Amino acid sequence: MSKIHKIAILGASGYTGAELVRLIASHPNMRIAALTADRKAGQEMGAVFPHLAHLDLPVLRRIEDVDFSGIDLAFCALPHGVTHGLVRNLPDHVKLVDLSADFRLRDGEAYRKWYGIEHSALDIQPSVAFGLPEHYRDQIRDARITANTGCYVATSLLALIPPVRDGVIDPDSIIIDAKSGVSGAGRGLKEAMLFAEVNEGFNAYGVAHHRHMGELDQELSKFAGRPVTPTFTPHLVPMNRGMMATIYVQGAAEEIHASLTRQYADEPFVHVQPLGQMPATRHVRGSNQCRIGVVADRRPGHAIVISVLDNLMKGASGQALQCANIMLGLDETTGLNMAPTFP
Amino acid sequence: MSKIHKIAILGASGYTGAELVRLIASHPNMRIAALTADRKAGQEMGAVFPHLAHLDLPVLRRIEDVDFSGIDLAFCALPHGVTHGLVRNLPDHVKLVDLSADFRLRDGEAYRKWYGIEHSALDIQPSVAFGLPEHYRDQIRDARITANTGCYVATSLLALIPPVRDGVIDPDSIIIDAKSGVSGAGRGLKEAMLFAEVNEGFNAYGVAHHRHMGELDQELSKFAGRPVTPTFTPHLVPMNRGMMATIYVQGAAEEIHASLTRQYADEPFVHVQPLGQMPATRHVRGSNQCRIGVVADRRPGHAIVISVLDNLMKGASGQALQCANIMLGLDETTGLNMAPTFP
Amino acid sequence: MSKIHKIAILGASGYTGAELVRLIASHPNMRIAALTADRKAGQEMGAVFPHLAHLDLPVLRRIEDVDFSGIDLAFCALPHGVTHGLVRNLPDHVKLVDLSADFRLRDGEAYRKWYGIEHSALDIQPSVAFGLPEHYRDQIRDARITANTGCYVATSLLALIPPVRDGVIDPDSIIIDAKSGVSGAGRGLKEAMLFAEVNEGFNAYGVAHHRHMGELDQELSKFAGRPVTPTFTPHLVPMNRGMMATIYVQGAAEEIHASLTRQYADEPFVHVQPLGQMPATRHVRGSNQCRIGVVADRRPGHAIVISVLDNLMKGASGQALQCANIMLGLDETTGLNMAPTFP
Amino acid sequence: MSKIHKIAILGASGYTGAELVRLIASHPNMRIAALTADRKAGQEMGAVFPHLAHLDLPVLRRIEDVDFSGIDLAFCALPHGVTHGLVRNLPDHVKLVDLSADFRLRDGEAYRKWYGIEHSALDIQPSVAFGLPEHYRDQIRDARITANTGCYVATSLLALIPPVRDGVIDPDSIIIDAKSGVSGAGRGLKEAMLFAEVNEGFNAYGVAHHRHMGELDQELSKFAGRPVTPTFTPHLVPMNRGMMATIYVQGAAEEIHASLTRQYADEPFVHVQPLGQMPATRHVRGSNQCRIGVVADRRPGHAIVISVLDNLMKGASGQALQCANIMLGLDETTGLNMAPTFP
């Protein structure tokens, strides 16, 4: 009989927290032992998220009221800037998958630039794994803390790391035109996220300067072997889930496609489509899959790469669970094999 | 090691067919052995439904090209009027869950009235189980053929059978104001189902005369012990999935609530909310659950009952799988325990 | 050369305020002379509503900073409970169309019951016109203050007043199942109104007890000549604009249809469809029209009446402008003749 | 008293035809004298488009049944490939605004390449005006035929012509990532346009090879003075109306912004936002406006330009009416001054 790992979800009142609960509820080797939400402490999860009301779940607590002694692994779905102050207070035996940006940036200066605050746990940073399993699987396996890659960055890096590393695209030519469903903005109250504001509309935001650039630069530069600062423009699509990056690069489509195909041939969650065939977000909705398509542009020497995933799954909670499976020595795909939901 | 049942899905190119594939793909005791779609015979399922392209599935065939000798159970997701002509051609050992309306009506005359054609297999009809497991579980267990209840009818009957049978509502007072997501209309090409026609709009259809009334009348009359013809008005909601019935009745809310609570106390998929608390379709999206709420109207002696489900799950393919599990002697909930998907 | 009336819009930072600006911007006999929004005072309207940025509009102010001496008419689009305290401070020469509920209820007790506060201007109430022009045109023409009918109530009353007054429906049998787009909830920050909460879902709210019942009761009772308390259930549709009331009554469809047809034969904004033909909200989107359909139910003696309008137009700002036109002696349809926007 | 021009709309059963009817219905100097739709000949417009049922309109006819003797101007909203065969049959006194692509391409070879058919009226082509009033106003004024610019091309060219002509961007660097609402695909029955297929999803289409490239190349090359072939990728957004082009170029943002600001300073329908401020499609919905924003990219020497419009208005029927106003000697903005509809 396989071991049941006890899981805590810190920050369970947001969308990524709820998605983790949904996933772990049918995971054969995990059991939710603690749920926290400071401002909703004392409430039932089913009151905060009625779609989970039928599950047998612990009541929401404040973090300081959690007994971590029996916890094997915690998912930290707290806002950016909170986890780095929290991590020292967790007992050493508790593994951590952090869904915030706090441990993604290796460089304290970069963290200050993009998040506007001082990082208080830079000493821990070097031991943290970058939570993109397809490229950091070994690190994740051995890490106590994994910094789950953000949704925009995962969508982009899965398409870009192989060809950048293989030198088949010019790193200085990268333009990422990204589009996201609304759930990525979280459950916080912002006028711009009201239904009547979003529905029947489309807009760019954070044009030319967006927080996720820090992670993009770090990883692309690492795999390119020199500084890379891609152009990145996020847009908001009137849908709940789904993310697409339309990426314009200089390079030969066939070589890019070959690099991606080699890289992901045996990956359970990343699928490279036949050359010239483009994926849509609806092809991955509700699943942990990423789909990537490559096509030659009509301008000679240019190619277009399109990468799609579900921002709450492979872009957040699904990938976090994938990392957790690795950290706990489980089959990486456990609890993540559902086919996409369509329509 | 448990047996793996071999499954055929007849009419796999529609939305309910795709949903069955999605569900069975992660069912531990079933394997898809045949998929049919007459007009798309020869195509890969992944070409017809790209979200299923990553699965290892048989190619689509014509029904006459299927070797049924190894098939244990077939789901029939064909249009109304086709199955009743087909059923005699299937070998006796093949169990059948029919998602069309062909075997739902006990009365040949009623079938002719609502569907405009003559039924060619009325001799078989008496042996067919009515596919609403919560009320016909024993019949389904012993049946070779189960006629899966339609989405509008399942939504309504789950809320109405207990109080009608218990005599706590006046059967002549029933008004069902129903609302459905668009996927219930199927994948056929109709101008009224184009995105630009549906989006940002809301309408009733089939007002005062709708095919599903035949099933409603049959079952409500049976449980009332006398003829019942409720008012029923379906509406189209600009969303993919989800169904709600807002039901107005004469009766005491407490008694109705008590009747429902008693009936469904141990049911895995039907949840009765605390008195006065109303469910929303988003609380069940993507799951096989039905949620029911009851509230007293301000008009004395009147009550409002609201029932919600996902029309492709508990309203179609999910319930069909629930019936199939029962017919095959499996745990009824196998492969159906996913929590709802929100947001 | 016709006179240009100077208009103030109090509470211009909400959706109904913005809709008034949109309409008046192309009204040949009105000019916007003042806009107020207490919390956004000092801002340009184009900063609060970028879609209006191309218009030449006064800057937003606090109400107390408005010079009302040159104002002919003010639209009051403030929250419920604010206008009744404000009205005494306006100079006598300023006509007022109030879009809040403050002056809709004749009875102070009813106001307290439904809005939970004491009304401070009950002495003024008797002189206020009920802002449903098709039934109170003469009152409105002579009034200094008009209380614009709410969206749910306008949708329902336009369909119900004629047959209730003509005695062709049983007032005790009325059940109003109402559905609204999201803009009716305003621009306030509520979790339930976030895109990700509303999209791909459908729910009822305020079941069995909703504020608008006060107005419904008052008007239906008046036209019935005795107390009437209909059943009323509002639902939220994932769309920006549009409202439908599906109304179940006891009565003969032909008589109801005849009553409505007679009443509205010459009305510019209310259209009764041929018997049996049902309207959809998309048929009136963006226009000041109301469409009404009637059909006989299959239950003898019962009928279904469906009424649709755009909740921001004929349900709010469009109707308010219609009232203002009447109060200022202009052609009632001025600035309101745009055809619906579809798709 | 001003003259009332008699208007024919050929191909009135599509979305652009319906939008023309909506606009002309409240145009003070035009009256609809004929409507054609071959397959719906004999039907009332209100049967085909119920939202127009309240208007007094001629019945739909076949083109050959129209008496053009009294017609001043015809809008041709027929499918690509039809108008060029039709134009010779129209009497000379009838002016024509063609919304199809038939007369947009100067080069017969290019037409054959992108549309796959031979052009039968190449002799007429040189006299046809390119229907982008902000850049071809004088041509349009004198033309008998104007070829209304397509939606993607109008969105892109309005942003690109001034800086390309002024030499402040490198024409070889242009990448247009375009996004469109669904109505641009028309009312034809295509599986990919069903609500359940589009809703909650996002996809690219026609990647690297799309018909509108022909027009883009022609106009950009003309204003650049040498061959230009931009990269162009269209995407489908789950909304009815709205179009955005996110354009990546090499050039100095300040110079691009200055070029655009100079060009459009006095234009009624094209608004250039302050440097760094980006427009959204909801800011122009339902109006004839185009809004353009410019921002410097973080990559030195690169800039991002975003252009938005309503694809059925400034992208099709609104612009066609603007052209018609010019051709008939009317004020260009007549009937087109409505503010955007939000929410």
Image (spheres, coloured by chain):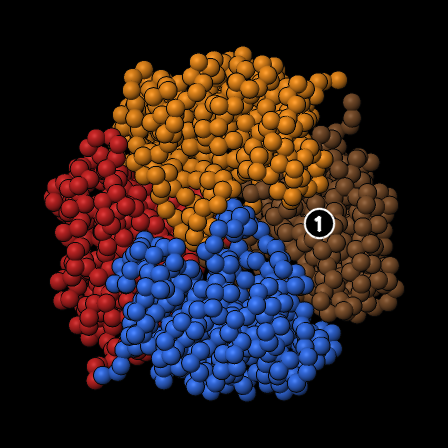
Chain colours: A orange, B brown, C blue, D red
* Picture layout, residue B224 above or below residue A314: below
Q: Position of residue A101 (x, y in %)?
A: 45, 27
Q: Which residue is drawn at 86% across and 47% down?
A: B139
Q: Is residue B95 left or right of residue D178?
A: right
Q: Where is residue B20 in the image (x, y as percent from the top left)?
A: 66, 41
| Residue C117, visible in the rendered structure | yes
Q: Residue at x 45, y 22 (%)?
A: A103
Which residue position is annotated with label 1? Answer: B291
SS at badge 1: strand
| Residue D194, visible in the rendered structure | no
Q: Which residue is drawn at 52% across and 81% down?
A: C126
Which of D19 and D210 lies nearest the eye of the viewer?
Answer: D19
Chain for numbered disc 1: B
Q: Position of residue B125 (x, y in %)?
A: 82, 55
Which of B260 and D14 lies nearest the eye of the viewer?
Answer: B260
* Picture layout, residue D250 above or below residue D316: above
Q: In this view, does A88 lie to the left or right of B337?
A: left
Which of C47 and B105 lies nearest the eye of the viewer?
Answer: C47
Q: In which quarter of the image is the C terminus of chain B?
A: top right
Quarter residue A40 falls in: top right
Quarter residue A177 falls in: top left
Residue type indicated by callout 1: Arg
Quarter residue C319 falls in: bottom left
Q: Where is residue C96 in the image (x, y as percent from the top left)?
A: 41, 75
Q: How crowded is mark 1: few (under 14 residues within 10 Å), some or many (20 or more)?
A: many
Which of A178 and B206 lies nearest the eye of the viewer?
Answer: A178
Q: Count how many numbered circles sit on residues in the image.
A: 1
